[in-house]
Amino acid sequence: MTDEVQPVVPGIADPIYVRVREQIRTDILKGVFSPGDRIKIADIARRYGVSQMPVREALQMLQGEGLITFAPNRGASIRNVDEHFIENMYEIRGALEALLMRRAISRIQDSDIFRLHAIEARYEECARQRDLDGVLRENKAFHHVIYQIADNVDALRLLERNWELVITMRRTFGFGAERLDQLVAEHRALIRALDRRDAAEAERVTLLHCENARQDLLAQREASGIAQSKKARRIR
Protein backbone atom coordinates (compact mmCIF):
# COMPACT_ATOMS: atom_id res chain seq x y z
CA MET A 1 0.00 0.00 0.00
CA THR A 2 1.42 3.37 -0.93
CA ASP A 3 2.05 6.02 1.77
CA GLU A 4 0.69 8.78 -0.45
CA VAL A 5 -2.06 10.67 1.37
CA GLN A 6 -5.24 11.60 -0.49
CA PRO A 7 -7.64 13.21 1.99
CA VAL A 8 -11.36 13.04 1.43
CA VAL A 9 -12.63 16.31 -0.02
CA PRO A 10 -15.10 17.95 2.37
CA GLY A 11 -18.65 18.35 1.17
CA ILE A 12 -22.22 18.43 2.39
CA ALA A 13 -24.04 16.50 -0.33
CA ASP A 14 -23.12 13.00 0.88
CA PRO A 15 -22.41 11.41 4.28
CA ILE A 16 -18.73 11.03 5.13
CA TYR A 17 -18.80 7.25 4.76
CA VAL A 18 -20.11 7.62 1.18
CA ARG A 19 -17.27 9.95 0.27
CA VAL A 20 -14.75 7.64 1.94
CA ARG A 21 -16.20 4.69 0.02
CA GLU A 22 -15.90 6.58 -3.27
CA GLN A 23 -12.30 7.57 -2.56
CA ILE A 24 -11.25 4.05 -1.57
CA ARG A 25 -13.05 2.62 -4.62
CA THR A 26 -11.32 5.09 -6.93
CA ASP A 27 -7.92 4.35 -5.41
CA ILE A 28 -8.46 0.60 -5.80
CA LEU A 29 -9.35 1.01 -9.48
CA LYS A 30 -6.41 3.35 -10.09
CA GLY A 31 -4.00 0.85 -8.56
CA VAL A 32 -3.09 2.96 -5.51
CA PHE A 33 -3.81 -0.20 -3.51
CA SER A 34 -2.55 -3.53 -4.80
CA PRO A 35 -4.55 -6.79 -4.89
CA GLY A 36 -4.13 -8.61 -1.60
CA ASP A 37 -3.19 -5.49 0.38
CA ARG A 38 -4.54 -5.69 3.91
CA ILE A 39 -6.70 -2.78 4.97
CA LYS A 40 -6.25 -1.46 8.50
CA ILE A 41 -9.06 0.82 9.55
CA ALA A 42 -6.77 3.12 11.54
CA ASP A 43 -4.42 3.53 8.57
CA ILE A 44 -7.28 4.34 6.19
CA ALA A 45 -8.74 6.83 8.67
CA ARG A 46 -5.40 8.65 8.89
CA ARG A 47 -4.93 8.50 5.13
CA TYR A 48 -8.21 10.25 4.36
CA GLY A 49 -8.35 12.44 7.45
CA VAL A 50 -11.55 10.97 8.92
CA SER A 51 -12.58 9.03 12.01
CA GLN A 52 -12.66 5.22 12.04
CA MET A 53 -16.46 4.86 12.04
CA PRO A 54 -17.07 6.06 8.44
CA VAL A 55 -14.16 3.88 7.30
CA ARG A 56 -15.84 0.79 8.81
CA GLU A 57 -19.11 1.66 7.06
CA ALA A 58 -17.33 2.32 3.76
CA LEU A 59 -15.50 -1.02 3.88
CA GLN A 60 -18.75 -2.88 4.54
CA MET A 61 -20.28 -1.24 1.47
CA LEU A 62 -17.23 -2.06 -0.65
CA GLN A 63 -17.45 -5.67 0.50
CA GLY A 64 -20.97 -5.69 -0.96
CA GLU A 65 -19.54 -4.45 -4.27
CA GLY A 66 -16.94 -7.21 -4.26
CA LEU A 67 -13.91 -4.91 -3.98
CA ILE A 68 -13.07 -5.80 -0.38
CA THR A 69 -12.94 -9.25 1.20
CA PHE A 70 -13.02 -10.10 4.89
CA ALA A 71 -11.29 -13.19 6.25
CA PRO A 72 -11.07 -14.56 9.82
CA ASN A 73 -7.94 -13.35 11.64
CA ARG A 74 -6.92 -11.28 8.63
CA GLY A 75 -9.49 -8.53 8.44
CA ALA A 76 -10.14 -6.66 5.19
CA SER A 77 -8.05 -6.97 2.05
CA ILE A 78 -8.19 -5.69 -1.52
CA ARG A 79 -9.66 -7.97 -4.15
CA ASN A 80 -8.04 -8.17 -7.57
CA VAL A 81 -10.18 -6.09 -9.94
CA ASP A 82 -8.93 -7.73 -13.09
CA GLU A 83 -10.37 -8.78 -16.44
CA HIS A 84 -12.04 -11.81 -14.85
CA PHE A 85 -13.71 -9.60 -12.22
CA ILE A 86 -15.14 -7.30 -14.90
CA GLU A 87 -16.26 -10.19 -17.10
CA ASN A 88 -18.09 -11.81 -14.18
CA MET A 89 -19.70 -8.52 -13.23
CA TYR A 90 -21.12 -7.98 -16.71
CA GLU A 91 -22.19 -11.59 -17.11
CA ILE A 92 -24.31 -11.28 -13.96
CA ARG A 93 -25.50 -7.83 -14.96
CA GLY A 94 -26.58 -9.04 -18.40
CA ALA A 95 -28.58 -11.93 -16.93
CA LEU A 96 -30.37 -9.66 -14.44
CA GLU A 97 -31.08 -6.93 -16.98
CA ALA A 98 -32.50 -9.48 -19.44
CA LEU A 99 -34.76 -10.78 -16.67
CA LEU A 100 -35.99 -7.30 -15.81
CA MET A 101 -36.47 -6.45 -19.47
CA ARG A 102 -38.76 -9.47 -19.93
CA ARG A 103 -40.78 -8.42 -16.91
CA ALA A 104 -40.94 -4.80 -18.04
CA ILE A 105 -42.35 -5.74 -21.47
CA SER A 106 -45.58 -7.05 -19.93
CA ARG A 107 -45.98 -4.03 -17.64
CA ILE A 108 -44.81 -1.01 -19.61
CA GLN A 109 -47.27 1.78 -20.43
CA ASP A 110 -47.18 4.42 -23.15
CA SER A 111 -46.39 7.02 -20.49
CA ASP A 112 -43.25 5.03 -19.64
CA ILE A 113 -42.17 5.11 -23.27
CA PHE A 114 -42.52 8.90 -23.24
CA ARG A 115 -40.35 9.05 -20.09
CA LEU A 116 -37.67 6.97 -21.78
CA HIS A 117 -37.74 9.21 -24.86
CA ALA A 118 -37.30 12.28 -22.63
CA ILE A 119 -34.36 10.77 -20.75
CA GLU A 120 -32.80 9.58 -23.99
CA ALA A 121 -33.04 13.10 -25.44
CA ARG A 122 -31.15 14.44 -22.42
CA TYR A 123 -28.64 11.61 -22.69
CA GLU A 124 -27.98 12.34 -26.35
CA GLU A 125 -27.40 16.00 -25.63
CA CYS A 126 -24.88 15.09 -22.92
CA ALA A 127 -23.21 12.62 -25.30
CA ARG A 128 -23.04 15.29 -28.03
CA GLN A 129 -21.30 17.66 -25.60
CA ARG A 130 -19.11 14.84 -24.23
CA ASP A 131 -20.43 15.66 -20.75
CA LEU A 132 -19.30 12.54 -18.85
CA ASP A 133 -21.18 13.29 -15.62
CA GLY A 134 -24.35 13.97 -17.58
CA VAL A 135 -23.93 10.81 -19.64
CA LEU A 136 -23.52 8.69 -16.51
CA ARG A 137 -26.47 10.36 -14.79
CA GLU A 138 -28.90 10.02 -17.70
CA ASN A 139 -27.77 6.50 -18.54
CA LYS A 140 -28.52 5.39 -14.98
CA ALA A 141 -31.89 7.19 -15.08
CA PHE A 142 -32.78 5.46 -18.37
CA HIS A 143 -32.15 1.99 -17.01
CA HIS A 144 -33.73 2.74 -13.66
CA VAL A 145 -37.07 3.48 -15.34
CA ILE A 146 -37.04 -0.01 -16.84
CA TYR A 147 -35.97 -1.58 -13.54
CA GLN A 148 -38.85 0.11 -11.71
CA ILE A 149 -41.39 -1.03 -14.30
CA ALA A 150 -40.13 -4.62 -13.95
CA ASP A 151 -41.03 -4.52 -10.23
CA ASN A 152 -38.54 -7.06 -8.88
CA VAL A 153 -36.98 -5.44 -5.82
CA ASP A 154 -34.48 -8.24 -5.19
CA ALA A 155 -33.04 -8.15 -8.72
CA LEU A 156 -33.04 -4.35 -8.53
CA ARG A 157 -31.09 -4.44 -5.26
CA LEU A 158 -28.40 -6.62 -6.85
CA LEU A 159 -28.08 -4.31 -9.86
CA GLU A 160 -28.09 -1.12 -7.82
CA ARG A 161 -25.28 -2.51 -5.68
CA ASN A 162 -22.76 -2.22 -8.51
CA TRP A 163 -24.08 0.86 -10.32
CA GLU A 164 -21.73 3.14 -8.38
CA LEU A 165 -18.86 0.75 -9.10
CA VAL A 166 -19.59 0.95 -12.83
CA ILE A 167 -19.84 4.74 -12.63
CA THR A 168 -16.50 4.99 -10.83
CA MET A 169 -14.92 2.68 -13.40
CA ARG A 170 -16.18 4.93 -16.19
CA ARG A 171 -14.94 8.06 -14.43
CA THR A 172 -11.57 6.36 -13.99
CA PHE A 173 -11.18 4.79 -17.43
CA GLY A 174 -13.62 6.77 -19.60
CA PHE A 175 -15.35 5.61 -22.80
CA GLY A 176 -13.93 4.59 -26.15
CA ALA A 177 -14.15 7.07 -29.02
CA GLU A 178 -17.25 5.41 -30.51
CA ARG A 179 -18.92 4.07 -27.37
CA LEU A 180 -21.16 7.06 -26.60
CA ASP A 181 -22.62 7.03 -30.13
CA GLN A 182 -23.00 3.27 -29.88
CA LEU A 183 -24.93 3.74 -26.63
CA VAL A 184 -27.32 6.11 -28.37
CA ALA A 185 -28.10 3.47 -30.99
CA GLU A 186 -28.59 0.81 -28.31
CA HIS A 187 -30.92 3.00 -26.25
CA ARG A 188 -33.00 3.84 -29.30
CA ALA A 189 -33.23 0.15 -30.21
CA LEU A 190 -34.39 -0.67 -26.67
CA ILE A 191 -37.10 1.99 -26.80
CA ARG A 192 -38.34 0.66 -30.15
CA ALA A 193 -38.48 -2.89 -28.82
CA LEU A 194 -40.31 -1.78 -25.68
CA ASP A 195 -42.76 0.32 -27.69
CA ARG A 196 -43.56 -2.72 -29.86
CA ARG A 197 -43.68 -5.00 -26.78
CA ASP A 198 -41.16 -7.20 -28.58
CA ALA A 199 -39.66 -9.23 -25.72
CA ALA A 200 -37.20 -11.20 -27.86
CA GLU A 201 -35.74 -8.09 -29.48
CA ALA A 202 -35.59 -6.21 -26.17
CA GLU A 203 -33.69 -9.07 -24.57
CA ARG A 204 -31.32 -9.35 -27.55
CA VAL A 205 -30.48 -5.65 -27.44
CA THR A 206 -30.08 -5.75 -23.66
CA LEU A 207 -27.52 -8.55 -23.84
CA LEU A 208 -25.70 -6.81 -26.71
CA HIS A 209 -25.71 -3.59 -24.67
CA CYS A 210 -24.00 -5.35 -21.74
CA GLU A 211 -21.49 -7.14 -23.95
CA ASN A 212 -20.49 -3.94 -25.75
CA ALA A 213 -20.14 -2.16 -22.39
CA ARG A 214 -17.91 -4.97 -21.10
CA GLN A 215 -15.66 -4.93 -24.14
CA ASP A 216 -15.31 -1.15 -24.11
CA LEU A 217 -14.56 -0.98 -20.37
CA LEU A 218 -11.89 -3.67 -20.66
CA ALA A 219 -10.35 -1.87 -23.63
CA GLN A 220 -10.27 1.48 -21.82
CA ARG A 221 -8.82 -0.09 -18.69
CA GLU A 222 -6.09 -1.72 -20.74
CA ALA A 223 -5.38 1.54 -22.58
CA SER A 224 -5.07 3.43 -19.28
CA GLY A 225 -2.00 1.43 -18.32
CA ILE A 226 -3.44 0.65 -14.89
CA ALA A 227 -3.87 -3.02 -15.73
CA GLN A 228 -0.23 -3.31 -16.78
CA SER A 229 1.03 -1.46 -13.70
CA LYS A 230 -0.87 -3.86 -11.41
CA LYS A 231 0.71 -6.82 -13.20
CA ALA A 232 4.15 -5.26 -12.77
CA ARG A 233 3.65 -4.80 -9.02
CA ARG A 234 2.55 -8.43 -8.61
CA ILE A 235 5.65 -9.65 -10.51
CA ARG A 236 7.94 -7.67 -8.19
Image: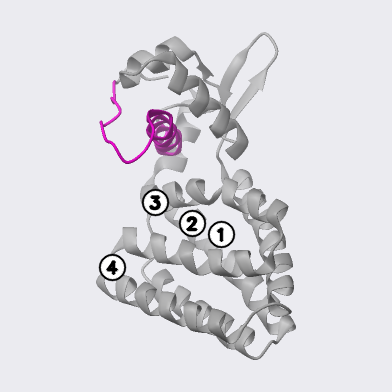
Q: Check if mark 2's residue and mark 1's residue have beta carbons within 8 Å.
A: yes
Residue beneath label 4, please?
Answer: 130
Label 2 close to label 3 by CB (< 8 Å): yes
> In this orientation, does residue 79 appear?
no
Q: Which mark is residue 214?
A: 1
Question: How far across and how far down the image is residue 54, in percent?
Answer: 44, 23
Identify the magenta region.
5-31
User: CA gap, disc 4 to disc 1?
Assistant: 20 Å
**In the image, what residue occupies the spot 62% across and 26% down?**
69
Residue bearing the label numbered 3: 173
The x and y percentages for residue 177 are: 36, 68
Residue nearest the viewer, comparing 123 with 89:
123
Residue under numbered circle 2: 217
User: In the image, 130: left or right of 176?
Assistant: left
Observer-nearest residue: 224 or 91? 91
Spatial separation of the CA atoms under disc 2 and disc 1: 5 Å
Residue 182 image position (x, y, % from top left):
46, 76
Label 3 CA crowd tier, 10 Å (few <14, some 14–19, many 20+): many
- What separation in Å lies between label 4 and label 2 (alpha carbons)? 17 Å
- Quadrant where the N terminus lies? top left
Q: Is residue 167 left or right of residue 65?
A: left
Q: Is residue 92 above or below residue 187?
A: above
Residue type at mark 1? Arg
Disc 2 from disc 3: Cα separation: 7 Å
